[in-house]
Image (cartoon, grey):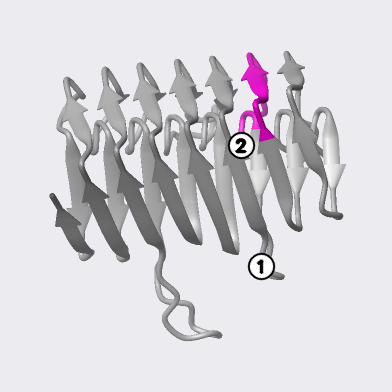
Amino acid sequence: SAGALNSTGSPVISNTLFFRNIGGYQGAGAVAAGSSISLIGCRFEENETEENGGALLLGDDLGTLGTIRGCLFLNNRARSAGAVDCQGISSENFDDCTFIGNRAEKSEAGDGGFGGAVTLIYTTNIFTNCVFRDNFAEAAGGAILTSGQPDPENGNIFNFLTVRNCTFTGNTAGTTGGAIHATSESVSIRNSILWGNTPDQYDRDMSDSSIA
């Protein structure tokens, strides 16, 4: 369960602080939503979970629709997806959001460590006018990890990631993809700055990608 809120409805949450919440078993640090949700002007700070999604977990197989606008994700921590985990055939738009100092750290068993700020699995996501700074992934994807491997039951399901007018700086990954690590999906990056990320700016593996 999530540390603060588990939602199956269609809530609109605005101007709310989620501070130092701790996620339970298989739960996000602060908020878990299995249906449509709107978050406007919220602040997620120092939330954590030993699972995925230090602040926010969005999506399930029913197809979640999410609008996240003007939110700050600061110093959240998880096994993977330090701040936000989107998964399960969902679609979310992130506008004017800031991700600073979030961390994805491996468990004692050595799993995880992906997506310092955000992990995207089987989802369609658009990030517009967002800032990713000083996030850390112990494995790959210092700011964002996006992946959509073929599903043996449902056929080929791929991620679609669009990044517009965003800035990625000072993000770090332990292996690859200092800013973004992409695997088997379509990625479009437009009018964005990727600078000063370690060990590289952008890493892709078998993806249909375009950068301009």
Residue 47 x, y percent position in the rendering: 67, 20
Q: Is residue 17 left or right of residue 135?
A: right
**Residue drawn at point x = 45 percent, y = 18 percent:** 100
Q: CA distance from mark 2 to mark 1?
A: 18 Å
Residue at numbered disc 1:
63
Q: Magenta-highlighted stretch: main secondary structure?
A: loop
Residue at numbered disc 2:
53
Name the amino acid type tagged 2.
Gly
Residue 87 x, y percent position in the rendering: 57, 56
Taking the magenta stretch, the answer to whether it contains residue 169 is no
Query: Which secondary structure lies at badge 2?
Result: loop
**Residue drawn at point x = 74 percent, y = 17 percent:** 17
**Residue drawn at point x = 45 percent, y = 15 percent:** 101
Q: Is residue 69 visible?
A: yes
Quadrant location of residue 158?
bottom left
Crowding near the residue tagged with mark 2, few <14, some 14–19, many ≥20 C-alpha atoms within 10 Å: many
Number of the front mark, 2 or 1: 1
Query: Which secondary structure lies at badge 1?
Result: loop
Question: Which mark, residue 71?
Answer: none
Residue 11 x, y percent position in the rendering: 82, 46
User: Which residue is nearer to you in this view: 39 or 107?
Assistant: 39
Residue 185 x, y percent position in the rendering: 32, 65
What segment carries the magenta color?
A: 40-55
Name the amino acid type tagged 1.
Gly
> In the picture shown, does residue 88 fall above or below 171?
below
**Of label 2 and label 1, which has the lower sequence position?**
2
User: Which residue is nearer to you in this view: 208 or 36?
Assistant: 36
Q: Is residue 111 visible?
A: no
Quadrant location of residue 184?
bottom left
Crowding near the residue tagged with mark 1, few <14, some 14–19, many ≥20 C-alpha atoms within 10 Å: some
